Amino acid sequence: MRHNKRNIVKKSFALLFLIAISISFIAAAENNDETPIALVKKIVKNVTHRVNQDSDWELAKTGMPLNSGEQVKTGFRSLALVLFTDGSGLLRVRENSILNILGKQSDKNLNKNTVIEKGFVGFEINKQEAEEFKFTTPTAVAAIRGTEGFIEVGDKNLSTIACSEGKIEVESLIGIKSKIFVEGGYFAVQQPNGYFKIKQLTGKMLDKLKQTKKSSLEKIKIETKEGTIEVEYYSDEE
């Protein structure tokens, strides 16, 4: 019974949140002809954004709409959840990451491209029909139709693409500019010559996938002989 009451309370808060977001969209639409592509659903610690490359970084706010060309940046031990307004997917922007949200209207479809300059981004993308949904890094482009996984930009801007469900088409932008497919249960690691090595997901990679589902930074106080210690940790989403 207590568990059911807790779920009801959570659903009520979620409904209120969605209503608040809807109001913010209406207000944004009244003040701006451009329809937001995404919104910042949740923020943990230090998250900033800017309108374009020439503007200054400012603190991001929960529920803030994002138009095409706007950027989001996370600091140390920080996180941003970015939700696309058309319901096509959710991004989990982990610490020390920078991404640019781009969108282009084509007939009735909104083609989206998330440019990851650096860092680690987990994603859950719903099945796309006629629309394009891409992730672009400095060294690769990944086309998504409907899948879950993550993309990481590492040393020398080389890309790692992991897929837990579905299929991802990946094209290298450097060296050997070939196309590959990464299916569920596998990941691709880019080499300096541009070539991608496809490997089965290891325990370490599965742990990284699990980390993309962690969103809340919690604090716990532990009493010791030396005094009270405050420990921060990420708790799993429910």
Image: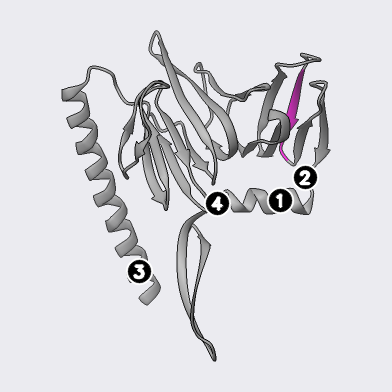
Q: Earlier in the sequence, mark 3 or mark 2?
A: 3
Q: Earlier in the sequence, mark 3 or mark 1?
A: 3
Counting the numbered discs, the total is 4
**Mark 1 and mark 4 residues within 8 Å of each other at the beta carbon:** no
Magenta span: chief secondary structure? strand
The answer to whether 43 is drawn above or below residue 66 in the figure is: below
Question: Which residue lies under the disc numbered 2?
Answer: 201
Left or right side of 155 for 72: left
Task: For marks 3 and 2, give the CA distance.
Answer: 35 Å
Left or right side of 126 for 3: left
Left or right side of 126 for 45: left
**One can see residue 200 in this view:** yes
Residue type pointed to by label 4: Lys
User: Residue 71 occupies which quadrant of the picture?
Assistant: top left
Question: Which residue lies under the disc numbered 4?
Answer: 213
The stretch in magenta equals 179-184
Let me know if residue 104 is in the magenta part.
no
Residue type pointed to by label 1: Leu
Residue visible at 83% across and 38% down in the picture: 199
Residue 148 position within the rendered picture, expressed as x and y whole percent measured from the top left: 60, 39
Q: Earlier in the sequence, mark 1 or mark 4?
A: 1
Residue type pointed to by label 3: Arg
User: Residue 82 occupies which quadrant of the picture?
Assistant: top left
